[in-house]
Image: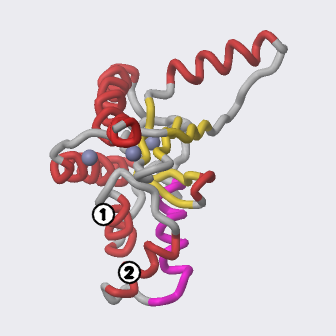
Amino acid sequence: MADPSPDASPDASADARADARADAGLAFADHDHAHCAGDTLARAEAVAAARGARLTPVRRRVLEILLEAHRAMGAYEVLDRLAAEGFGHQPPVAYRALEFLVENGLAHRVRRLNAFAACMSPGQEHSPVFLICRSCDAVAEAPTEPVRAALAAAAADLGFTVERATVEALGLCAVCRQSAAA
Ligand SMILES: [Zn+2]
Ligand SMILES: [Zn+2]
Ligand SMILES: [Zn+2]
């Protein structure tokens, strides 16, 4: 079994935070996504190897499919793709692979959309903060630290300790806001 404890070193996390900020901006902008996806896949592979989590062909393929765009995909959409590629038609094929990716921090569940998105900062222990564009369905992971700090401070005022929080904000990305205004 993979060890669920965080294993990112403190030095790596500052870099990773800067990366997360850059990635969040990229999701809503024109960018070299092939490079972005390839880079994230390579990081995910390194994380899986370090954790002793086996990226079988179907698990790896599901991650590649999720990485095709900055968008969340439903399990049945993933299953359709797997079926078309000969991985099988049974829903557990998709569900098990998605579950594996989520458990190992390589993907996240986006509850509002009942869908899954590849993690753009694999290997960093984090509760994601999602920004979801209601017009183009783009999904970005925002830098989590300021949001978590604000939430922790607000909770502390009430004598409450936050252990986990999922933040999903719905709105318009810059591109869609511009075309809505035009
Ligand atoms: Zn990208
Ligand atoms: Zn993430
Ligand atoms: Zn948009």
Please give the residue where the numbered disc 1 appears in the rendered image: 64
Count of all numbered marks drawn on residues in the image: 2
Residue 33: percent from the left, percent from the top? 20, 49
Give me the residue at 84% from left, 14% from top. Answer: 159
The amino acid on which the numbered mark 2 sits, given as a three-letter code, is Leu
Q: Residues within 10 Å of mark 1 (few under 14, many from 20)?
A: some
Q: In terms of secondary structure, what is the magenta stretch mainly? A: helix
Residue at point 40%, 41% (across, down): 180
* Residue in the foreground of this view, choosing between 56 and 83: 83
The image quadrant where one finds the C terminus is: top left
Q: Quadrant of residue 157?
A: top right
Q: Is residue 26 magenta?
A: no
Q: Where is residue 65 in the image (x, y as percent from the top left)?
A: 33, 66
- Secondary structure beneath disc 2? helix
Which segment did they paint magenta? 89-103
Return the residue at label 2: 82
Residue 44 horizontal/vertical position (percent): 33, 50
Residue, far right = 159
Q: Which of marks 2 and 1 is nearer the N terminus?
A: 1
